[in-house]
Image (cartoon, rainbow, N blue to C red):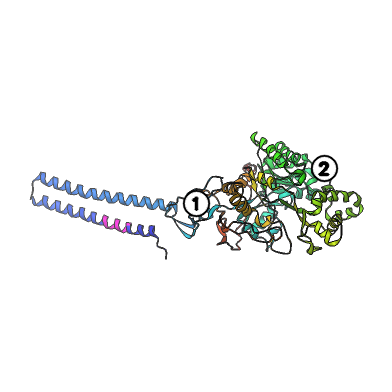
Amino acid sequence: MRIEFQGSLSVIVTVVQTLLITWVLRSMADTYYKARNRIETGNCCITSRMRFCVSVFGRDLVWFLMVGCLFNQTSLAQETTSKLDPRVDILLRGGTVIDGTGSIAKPVEVAIQNEKILILQPDSRITAEWELDCKGLVVCPGFIDLHNHSDGEIETPERRVAMNYVMQGCTTLVTGNCGSGPVDVASYYSQIDDHGAGTNIAHLLPQGGLRRKILASDRVAPTDSQLDQMLQLTEQAMQDGAWGMSTGLIYVPSSYATTEEITAIATVVAKHKGIYVSHIRGEGTNLLESVSEAMQIGRDAGLPVHISHFKAAGRSAWGLVREATQQIEEQRKLGFKITADQYPYIASSTSLGATVLPSWAREGGNKALRERLVTERESLEPLIKKSLTNADNGKAIRLASYKARPDWVGKDLSTIAELTGKSVVNVALEVLRNGGASVVKFSMNEQDVRHVMRMPWVATASDGSAKLPGPTKPHPRNYGTFPRKLGHYALSEKVIPLEQAIYSMTGLPADILSMTDRGRLETGLIADIAVFDPKKIAAKATFDNPHQYATGIKYLFVNGKPTVVDGRPTGALPGRALKYNSPHAKDDQKR
């Protein structure tokens, strides 16, 4: 049984006050009657009678004033205590608090009251409904995944808990990336709020989906009327709470848009103070030109730019990312707001089609591609062969999922070619003709990955989606991005300080999105909080065995509600849609 010391003390003080006031009043009354009797009986002279009265009444007046002061001070203390609310919902006591700003750990304690954060001094006497001993643990903001593809999965009953992200310490996922996802933002957000989710969801307007809604998957320029329709849909999406827009400029149909078309859409986003997020046109030898295009769109439209999964892909491009970081740093020094994100692995993942064929060859989707592989095989086969040659003759490309031949999943194209007696090109053609496959491609240099990681403007992001264990072998980033950055690169390899690693997945992504109520441990902000064991935080997922949950997350709170307790998921769905509050939309409402 918990003893409420402050409440008991208040009762005791009140009783003592009552007794003292009663005693003083009785004493003053007795004094009055005694003085009156002495005066009436004439037992002393007038001067003596007056001195007696003054001394007695003076003594009793002093007592009365002292009791009054005591009563006043106690009432004031009680009022102050009441304002501070000495009892909170949850108290995280004794942990190493890293607040998400990049600063070193602070000697404070963190409490949760009514879904909000309350920062306390270590000697605070505040009590809690639920007090957690966090000694030896790190307390920090929940992680924000800036680049996520759970748009469809988060709406399904079996995946909306997003277990693989909850176990990584994620409290918010940003969807609508790479130009793909729901265009009707209001409807999408409504689905999230109606059913809940394991994490919060923030959404970007996907330019590819927007273009498909008006132009299908055709490689054509929009008419003035069609462009106007896209701009109207963009305006509506921003009013409905989209945080900005995204492009996927290697994918169909996003890649068919010209720089000018994208800029026109971005101008509408800029009016709402949103952000332009881009999977740029090229991450290989054309990396610098692609980064330049993204920055030009940002400058011309007047909005911040964010580069998705920043990297140099392909052996011939290794080292270029260092030049690209210099390119970005120069613009940042001039005041241009440009940032990037990164997953901490040397392999990427996308479709086989996007890996071995240019976007013009994929016009019209898989059905059109299958027909084209027959009618235009002579022109397409050399392109596929060149892509495979650059991928170590297919050894660098593994099948992550392929319905037609599940036994090929997890094997690289070169190995499959040996097992089947076919050429690597013919294996790729067979897969493409059978509907395609998702692949994992080993294409980055470890030193490049570490270089990008050290940039203070590079956030951590997974480029994954909500998964369930199964026969597929997806990229391990789906299960391990955030713990890998913390456990491997920060704590073990010392590539960056722990505080910077945490900042890259909390305060920095919040700043990039202009998200003001999350991402930091600060009184009054929403209680999205992660608590992890620095000795156990680790990504267990591997490329050979990717469906393994991360370890080390001890507690996780989403909007003040626990989603992980003692290292075990609760299955709760406290996540909700996070809507961007556009300043422009507010101005329109005022008018």
Q: Can residue 161 be seen in the rendering of this structure?
A: no
Measured in 3D between alpha carbons, the distance from the residue under mark 1 to the one under mark 2, in whole angstroms, is 54 Å
Mark 1 / mark 2, whichever is N-terminal = 1
Tag 2: residue type? Thr
The percent coordinates of residue 227 (x first, y second) are: 78, 43
Magenta run includes residue 100: no
Residue 118 image label: 1
Residue 223 image label: 2
Who is closer to the viewer here, 480 or 83? 480
Q: Is residue 93 left or right of residue 420?
A: left
The residue segment tinted magenta is 13-21
- Placement of 372 over or under 419, stated as above or below: above
Q: Residue at x 23, y 48 (%)?
A: 61
Q: Can residue 271 be seen in the rendering of this structure?
A: yes
Tag 1: residue type? Leu
Magenta run includes residue 18: yes
Q: Name the magenta segment's main secondary structure.
A: helix
- Placement of 15 over or under 288, stated as above or below: below
Q: Is residue 172 left or right of residue 4?
A: right
Q: Is residue 301 left or right of residue 9?
A: right
